Image (cartoon, rainbow, N blue to C red):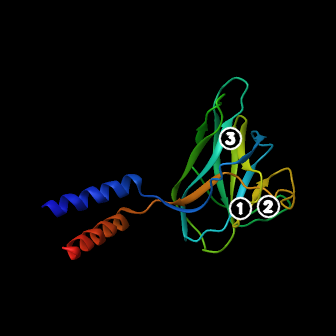
Amino acid sequence: MKKLVIVAMLCICCQVFGVIIDQSNLVASPLGTNAGGSGWAWYGQSFTPTLTGLDFVEFKLVGLNDDSSSTTMVVDILDSVSGTNGMEGTVLATSESVSVVTALDGYAIYTFNFASTVSLTSGHTYVARVRSLSGNFGIMITASDVYAGGQYLLSSESYVYTNFYDAIFTEGMIPEPATIALLGFGVLSLIKRKR
């Protein structure tokens, strides 16, 4: 009975805290912001996954509305870096919308979840394109090209111009309950084997 309780607790912890981070750039020395808006400027980050799926993308953002209202945003996953600005690929999936707060105290990490896992090919380069459905926003970028698997993209510039920067971002997967249960049974086996 005690073992079952331990396994159950492990499964619950993995379910609550269990995410798999695949690619990220969380450099602590950012350059600053680029201001975007509804329909006229999009931002993005190309990335090269090692996993074969994606459940969420995170960006460091801030709303930039004069009236302090929030900005409604989504992230599109594009099949490749294509076109002059690198963000003209085919849309594979669009995230659920997120409200980004206009804040005087700065940026925050916002998580964009997808309704179902987006299928990816490991080693192929994709684009996570951030766009506003309403309102203005800013995206935090780094002062140099610190993420080797892709680059920052800006809709009004050639992607050759922006290849010296990266957005502050993370992408990854949330394990399915069956995977988490297998992990719990594996941990239980190891505990039993040690005894």
Amino acid, disc 1: Ser
Choose mark 3 or mark 1, whichever is in front: 1
The answer for how far apart the CA atoms under marks 1 and 2 are is: 8 Å
Pick whichever of labels 1 and 2 is earlier in the sequence. Answer: 1
Choose mark 1 or mark 2, whichever is in front: 1
Say left or right for 20 vs 39: left
- The residue pinned by badge 1 equals 46
Which element type, helix, strand or loop, lies under badge 2?
loop
| Figure check: 122 above or below 55 | below
Pick whichever of labels 3 and 1 is earlier in the sequence. Answer: 1
Amino acid, disc 2: Gly
Residue situated in front as seen by the camera: 165 or 35: 165
| Within-10-Å neighbours for mark 1: few <14, some 14–19, many 20+ | many
The answer for how far apart the CA atoms under marks 3 and 2 are is: 20 Å
The quarter of the picture where residue 64 lies is top right
The answer for how far apart the CA atoms under marks 3 and 1 are is: 21 Å
| Residue 126 image offset from top left, x and y in percent | 68, 65
- The residue pinned by badge 2 equals 86
